[in-house]
Each structure stands twice: as C-alpha cells, then as structure tokens.
Amino acid sequence: LKKKKKKKKGGGKGGKGPSPQEAIQKLRETEEMLTKKQEFLEKKIDQELQIAKKNGTKNKRAALQALKRKKRYEKQLAQIDGTLSTIEFQREALENANTNTEVLKNMGFAAKAMKSAHENMDIDKVDDLMQDITEQQELAQEISDAISKPVGFGEEFDEDELLAELDELEQEELDRNLLEIGGPENVPLPNVPSTSLPSRPGECLLKNPNKNCPSSPAFTNIKDWVKM
C-alpha cells in the first residue's frame, strides 16, 4: 500500500501542466468547433421548419415530427451558446493572466537592469556633479554677458545730448526741404556796373542845344524840337 501511495504521489509530481499559450490555443480550437456546430444546427432548424410548413395541412404527422426535431436542435443550439460563452470567458481570463505574467516578467527584468545600472552610482557624487554643472553654467553665462557688453574704450557719451543733436539735424533737414518747395527768399541781383553811364539825351540837348549829343532817331527829333 505504501508503494502504491508513493507511486501516486510521484505521478502527481511528475505531471507538468500545459503552458498558457497551449491552453489558449486549445480553447480557440474548441470555439471554432462549436461555432461550426452552431452553423450546422441553425441550418437543420431552418430545414425542419420548412418541412413543418410544407406538411402542415397535408401530413400533420410529418409536420409534428419536424417540429419535434426542430425543438431538439434549438435545445442543443442553446447549450452550445452557453458553452461558447463559458469558453470565451475562460480564454479571455487566461489571456489576461498570460499578459500579466509577461508584464511582470519584463518589469522584473527592467528592475534588475536598473539596479545594475545604479550599482556604481553614489547619490552624494551625483549631487556634487550637478552642483558643479550648475556653477559652470552660471560662469559661462557671466562670461557671455561680459563679452556681449559694449565697450566704449573710455569714451562715454550722454545719450540726451546725442538725441538733442539728432533733433537739430532733423530740423535743419526739414527747413532745407521747405525752402526747396517754396522757392528762395532772396533772389540774387546783378552786379552794379563799374563804368559810369552816359547822361540822358534829353538833358544834354536842353542844357547845350548847340552841342553834339548822341545821335539816334529819337535824339534827332528832340534836337529839332529844341531849335524851333
């Protein structure tokens, strides 16, 4: 008896259960088989219904037998529907369990990898390193600000004075443009002759009738009129 018990225990330990993938595959095959059985029963139910309609008035016995077979097929179909629902639920639960197993396995693998990566890291060293990086960044920013700052080489100018001078230049340019549009205020006159002009002919004749004055048709008429 003891040997038989040992054999039973040994047989129980030696049996290895199927993998989740194998069980899922078996359940899918069973679903396919039951689905085909469903299609077959649905066709049989339609056939028996047609027979019952055909023999309803002519052969009531044949019609009743067809309806009985139809009821049996419908009962089997209902059972298959329930079985398919159970198998589908079991398959989905098994798929979820298999997914969770794979997820946990990968998470454990990632945890080991992370632990291996952090094995040679010291948090104090990391803090010191980050502090050094921050200091170097601040120093680099100060250097950039110093380089980009304009250098006057000792020449400092008052910005207000520069703006005032710029306003004067703009006003001069505006005045020049207005003069060009309105015309010059002072038109240049011709120069005064350097030589003395001759006296007027009439005055010459009135003062000296017997003296020869500049001759011209107008002067001659005046001279004749004075002699009269």
Image (cartoon, rainbow, N blue to C red):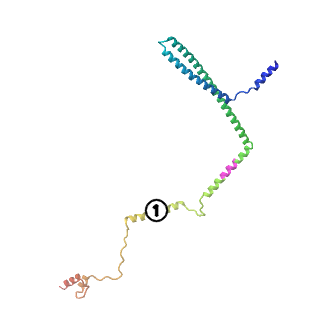
**Which residue corresponds to mark 1?**
170
* Residue 54 placement (x, y as % from top left): 48, 16
- Dominant SS in magenta: helix
Q: Would residue 134 be counted in the magenta stretch? A: yes
* Residue 12 placement (x, y as % from top left): 76, 24
* Residue 171 placement (x, y as % from top left): 45, 62
What residue sits 55% from the left and 15% below the top? Answer: 69
Quadrant into which the C terminus falls:
bottom left
**163 left or right of 224?**
right
Quadrant into which the N terminus falls:
top right
Q: Would residue 115 be counted in the magenta stretch? A: no
Circle 1 packing at 10 Å, graded few (<14), some (14-19), many (20+), is few
Name the residue type under label 1: Glu
* Residue 135 placement (x, y as % from top left): 68, 51
- Looking at the image, residue 66 lies above or below residue 118: above
Q: Which residues are magenta?
A: 130-138
Q: Nearer the viewer, residue 133 or 81?
A: 81
What residue sits 78% from the left and 24% below the top? Answer: 10
- Looking at the image, residue 114 lies above or below residue 45: below
Q: Nearer the viewer, residue 77 or 204?
A: 77
Residue 220 lies in what quarter of the image? bottom left
Residue placed furthest toward the right: 2
Q: How many marks?
A: 1
Q: Nearer the viewer, residue 88 or 202?
A: 88
What residue sits 41% from the left and 64% below the top? Answer: 177
Residue placed furthest toward the left: 228
- Looking at the image, residue 167 lies above or below residue 218: above
Q: Nearer the viewer, residue 53 or 112?
A: 53
Residue 70 lies in what quarter of the image? top right
Residue placed furthest toward the top: 61
- Callout 1 secondary element: helix
**33 left or right of 110?**
left
